[in-house]
Amino acid sequence: MKEIMKILAVFSFLLVFSTTANAQDPAFSQFYANPLYLNPAFAGAFNGGCPQTTLNYRDQWPGIGRTYVTTAASYDQHFNSLGGGIGILVMNDRSGDGNIMTNAVSLMYSYHLEVNRKFSVKAGFEASYRMLNLDWSELTFGDMIDPKYGFIYPTQEDIVNNPNKVSYPDFSAGFIGYSENLFFGFAAHHLTQPNQGFISESQLPTKLTAHIGANIPLSRYRNSVTTISPNFLYQKQQDFQQFNYGVYVNRGPIVGGLWARHSVKNVDSFILMVGLIQDAFKFGYSYDITLSNLKNSNTLGAHELSFTLFMPCRSRSKSFNTISCPSF
């Protein structure tokens, strides 16, 4: 009886992972280190409008078999002739040790409007193409379970003839407003709620994002300024809601951050971050400490790395107000 209960517990655990992976987009703890993924309006908003290339890597819950691994690469810059920024984002997400793989390519444009000398807005639009792959042979089904020995039987499910690829276009939009020390924004992803089902129809729910923060100078020592930046992020996708709130402290080239992430009912994780900012690049590392019920499953939290290369402008970019949101 105990063996049966253990098997059912494991099966339910994997089922929860599978359902969650389909219902929600991947989440980055260093959300401002992957700005194009957070909000398409960020295209061309950083590095004084000059080109920048960003790489992101996230390994969530490696203690249970690399269940979620997400990588991203992006490029963006401001173009005077277009009156805004252009960006491209490429992402890969592996769920269930590669059982479900999602690849996406996104192009975005963000129009820049300087309302006055102290306040600017940017409005962005994103067009994406997403491709999902499912390895049916790596999945487990109820008819494979033996009450004593576990998963030992071959399944009778028709996994050979089931489709294993789904692809579709996807569209998103967003805007940001910012002054010297305050910034806020809103984004809506998956506006058309495309069908991503392999067998039956399964719509990808629209994801809503709202973010706001401030950049407060505290003190100046020699040529460096110490700043503190409180931030709040809210995301909603179907019935799932998530809150992120915390603070960054920047002293010279060193950035430290700590914040919490939780849903409406449960605390999910506590996040620690450290980063280094130089003239030519920035690098960040963060670790998610699991606080939810999964903490007893030895998940080993989540590790996340980010790297951005700042490149000079080939031609002099038109001067505009620089956004003061955090680097990570």
Image (spheres, rainbow, N blue to C red):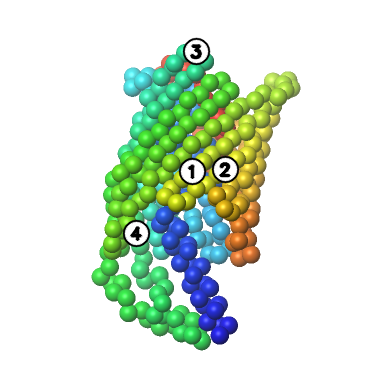
Q: Which amino acid lies under the numbered mark 1 shown in the image of this protein?
A: Gln
- Separation of disc 2 and disc 4 at Cα? 30 Å
**Image location (x, y in percent) of residue 63:** 58, 63
Marks 1 and 2: in contact by CB < 8 Å?
Answer: yes
**Image location (x, y in percent) of residue 60:** 54, 55
- Residue 117: give its label: 3
**Res. 34 visible in picture:** yes
- Separation of disc 4 and disc 3 at Cα? 48 Å
Query: Disc 1 or 4, which lies upstream in sequence?
Result: 4
Residue at the spot 45% in from the left edge and 58% down from the top edge: 20
Side (left or right) of 274 relative to 150:
right
- Separation of disc 2 and disc 1 at Cα? 9 Å
Query: Disc 4 or 3, which lies upstream in sequence?
Result: 3
Marks 4 and 2: in contact by CB < 8 Å?
Answer: no
Q: Which amino acid lies under the numbered mark 4 shown in the image of this protein?
A: Asn
Please tell me how crowded label 1 is: few (under 14), some (14-19), or many (20+) other residues with Cα within 10 Å: some
- Separation of disc 1 and disc 3 at Cα? 31 Å
Q: Quadrant of residue 18?
A: bottom left
Q: Would you name the residue on which mark 2 appears? A: 244
Q: Would you name the residue on which mark 4 appears? A: 133
- Residue 235: give its label: 1
Query: Disc 3 or 2, which lies upstream in sequence?
Result: 3
